[in-house]
Image (cartoon, helix red, strand yellow):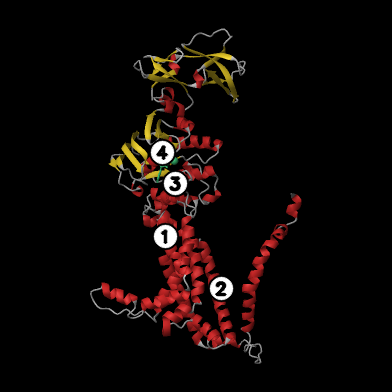
């Protein structure tokens, strides 16, 4: 036994290496290599593919700071991320609570499926469905006019709210899932104990359930905030002219302008900003969990 | 403090009657044990009294107030759960303070009352710890302090000691009893452990399949149980069955058993007698007969189990087994296979009218 301990922690890892190897190989191929290639591109003047001359430069990074446009767009993307995350929490947490603590058996399974369904549908189909609902003369317009006694015109298409709606719909399942997992782990007897001590339902929620579910709320928020800040599909299709965000500009560099080096540099700046935000928030988040 | 009356309470889950017309009066300041096998409805009854669940019919009265429709948070009860149910996101002191702070008491008075409650359960120094840093016995004490700090009218405990090991359980029994006396709170204690019920409570109610089979002070139930079920469930008992003779029974082979405990019964029907194993004296059949004590049976020792301070003999009599506990006083033991004579007094025999 003593010899084993003296051999140190490495002796525990070595037998596991053959098992870990495929995972690390996959990570190398799927993430590390493309990311390194992008990092490489971001310091180039031009793509080497077309046989043009190229050299190393930091001009792509300088471009971000030279024009106020990118900074403004990044701000609005961060705001978009924050708003979508908030809406997802406001909708996802109560939904997860009902799933975890109110519904039982069959009905829970059925509702769970409904909540998760957007996950399984194709993103483009999902967004174009929203386009059909939100546009003037679309489904929402027709239904509302059929119900309401007065005539209104609902045209949410190509607006900021449309982008929010589309993104919230796409990302709310993350919040439901992460909150569901933490809520389900809360023993019912804790809630009963709090009630037996005289706590109203609101007090139970505020002082017991939300603190205990905080890890799920935070995990969901991170999972949503990060991709939403860089999102481009929903802003482009549902936002139209108002849908110009940081993510759509990056997309333009890759698919329209073919300025890959600038697109790569903008992506890395976004990555850095998001990491800085998460690092700055982590002491607060850690205290909350 | 207040007494609790449960009057003709029934509660069904689907077609299953978990409680069937149960009436119990829990005296003010008393320690009442609800005893019964698993699934007999103990937890269901406790949850109805607490207000987590509501009866289909019947009344529940705390003090003078009918509370059948009052939800738990308005009933002013204290509850201790089997798994303690301490809030993992709060320190020990905050756990205890929870009930006071949701009531909006001032910080100063909360701090004072929490300190008193923690001192009462002898955890004065552990207020800053988190629940996961405590041992099982300490968690139990925190749960108790949290339940009593709000000065509830009734203290309800659902098998609170069953998760502790034997030695700790005995300590906690003593401790719980001391605290209960000190604050004089009406206490309802659910257990399936008959020893726990006997040692701790002033009154015991025995539940079976959702019905109250018998209730009374522990000694009364132990010495003169009214049914075979309570005789065997509360302690150990030998049950002898035969025809009623008025003051006892006649066994199938004609032997008369005389009883002076229990109810007198009419002749003609079937009846049974209960005899505690420790009340029976055992002697080898060849030994000089002891002074006759009224009831006597013959048999053969089929098995003997040594348990330190006592031994248990299993005596076979015409296919039936009679258990006898003998204190280990140093007398020579009787070997398995020996013929023996059993005798005991009519006072040790409880007549039970046939179930
Ligand atoms: N919420 C419930 N739904 C359905 N059946 C229940 C429920 N609670 C208790 N029961 C049933 O009622 C009976 C009594 O249960 P319980 O009061 O928990 O017994 P005990 O605490 O004495 O072991 C059991 O048969 C149990 O299955
Ligand atoms: Mg139970």
Q: Nearer the viewer, residue A49 or A202?
A: A49
Disc sitting over residue B146 in the figure: 3
Q: Earlier in the sequence, mark 1 or mark 2?
A: 1
> Which chain hosts label 2?
A
Disc number at residue A110?
A: 1
Q: Does any atom of ligand 1 lie closer than 8 Å to the CB of label 4?
A: yes
Residue mark closest to the camera, 4 vs 3: 4
Q: CA distance from mark 3 to mark 2?
A: 43 Å
For the residue carrying disc 4, how many other residues have a C-alpha within 10 Å: few (<14), some (14-19), or many (20+)?
A: many
Marks 1, 2: nearer the viewer = 1
Q: Is residue A35 above or below residue B262?
A: below
The answer to whether tags 1 and 3 share a subunit is no
The answer to whether B348 is drawn above or below residue A232 in the figure is: above
Q: Answer yes or no: are tags 1 and 4 on the same subunit.
A: no
State the residue lying farthest toward the bottom.
Answer: A52
**Mark 4 in CB contact with mark 3 (< 8 angstroms):** no
| Rendering coords of residue B59 (x, y %) | 29, 40
Coordinates of residue B29 in the picture (x, y in percent): 37, 35
Residue plotted at (33% across, 48% down): B71
**Front residue of A144 and A44:** A144
The quadrant the C terminus of chain B occupies is: top left
Q: Residues within 10 Å of mark 3 (few under 14, many from 20)?
A: many
Q: Secondary structure at mark 3?
A: helix
């Amino acid at each position: 036994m003593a010899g084993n301990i003296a051999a140190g922690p490495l002796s525990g890892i070595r037998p596991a290496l053959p098992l870990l190897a495929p995972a690390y190989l996959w990570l190398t191929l799927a993430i590390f290599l493309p990311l390194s290639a992008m990092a490489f591109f971001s310091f180039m003047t031009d793509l080497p593919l077309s046989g043009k001359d190229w050299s190393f430069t930091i001009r792509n990074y300088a471009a971000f700071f030279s024009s106020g446009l990118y900074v403004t767009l990044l701000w609005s993307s961060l705001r978009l991320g924050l708003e979508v995350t908030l809406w997802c929490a406001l909708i996802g947490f109560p939904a997860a609570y009902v799933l975890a603590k109110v519904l039982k058996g069959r009905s829970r399974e059925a509702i769970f499926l409904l909540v998760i369904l957007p996950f399984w549908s194709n993103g483009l189909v999902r967004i174009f469905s929203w386009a059909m609902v939100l546009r003037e003369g679309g489904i929402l317009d027709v239904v509302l006019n059929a119900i309401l006694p007065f005539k209104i015109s609902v045209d949410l298409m190509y607006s900021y709210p449309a982008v929010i709606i589309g993104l919230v719909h796409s990302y709310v399942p993350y919040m439901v899932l992460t909150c569901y997992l933490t809520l389900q782990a809360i023993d019912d007897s804790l809630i009963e104990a709090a009630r037996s001590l005289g706590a109203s339902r609101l007090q139970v929620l505020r002082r017991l359930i939300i603190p205990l579910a905080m890890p799920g709320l935070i995990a969901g928020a991170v999972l949503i905030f990060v991709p939403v800040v860089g999102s481009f599909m929903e802003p482009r299709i549902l936002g139209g002219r108002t849908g110009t965000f940081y993510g759509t500009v990056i997309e333009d560099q890759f698919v329209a302008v073919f300025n890959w080096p600038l697109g790569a540099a903008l992506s890395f700046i976004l990555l850095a900003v998001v990491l800085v935000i998460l690092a700055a928030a982590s002491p607060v988040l850690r205290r909350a969990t | 403090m207040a007494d609790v009356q449960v009057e003709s309470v029934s509660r069904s889950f689907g077609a299953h009657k978990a409680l069937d017309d149960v009436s119990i009066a829990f005296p003010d300041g008393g320690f009442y044990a609800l005893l019964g096998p698993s699934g007999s409805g103990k937890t269901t009854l406790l949850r109805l009294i607490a207000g987590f669940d509501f009866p289909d019919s019947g009344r529940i009265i705390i003090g003078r107030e009918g509370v059948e429709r009052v939800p738990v948070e308005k009933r002013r009860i204290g509850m201790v759960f089997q798994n303690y149910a301490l809030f993992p996101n709060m320190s020990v002191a905050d756990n205890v303070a929870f009930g006071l702070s949701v009531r909006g008491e001032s910080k100063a008075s909360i701090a004072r009352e929490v300190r008193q409650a923690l001192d009462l359960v002898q955890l004065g120094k552990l207020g800053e710890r988190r629940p996961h840093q405590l041992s099982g016995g300490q968690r139990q004490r925190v749960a108790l302090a949290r339940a009593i700090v709000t000065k509830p009218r009734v203290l309800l405990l659902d098998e609170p000691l069953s998760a502790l090991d034997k030695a700790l359980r005995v300590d906690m029994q003593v401790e719980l009893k001391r605290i209960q006396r000190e604050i004089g709170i009406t206490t309802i204690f659910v257990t399936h452990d008959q020893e726990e019920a006997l040692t701790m409570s002033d009154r015991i109610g025995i539940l079976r399949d959702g019905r109250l089979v018998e209730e009374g002070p522990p000694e009364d139930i132990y010495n003169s149980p009214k049914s075979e079920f309570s005789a065997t469930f509360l302690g150990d008992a030998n049950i002898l069955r035969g025809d009623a003779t008025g003051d006892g029974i006649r066994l199938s082979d004609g032997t008369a058993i005389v009883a002076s405990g229990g109810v007198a019964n009419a002749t003609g029907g079937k009846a049974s007698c209960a005899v505690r194993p420790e009340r029976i004296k055992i002697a080898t059949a060849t030994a000089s007969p002891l002074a006759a004590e009224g009831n006597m049976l013959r048999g053969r020792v089929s098995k003997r189990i040594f348990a330190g301070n006592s031994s248990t003999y299993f005596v076979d009599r015409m296919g039936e087994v009679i258990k006898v506990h003998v204190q280990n006083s140093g007398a020579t033991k009787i070997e398995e296979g020996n013929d023996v004579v059993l005798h005991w007094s009519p006072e040790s025999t409880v007549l039970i009218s046939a179930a």
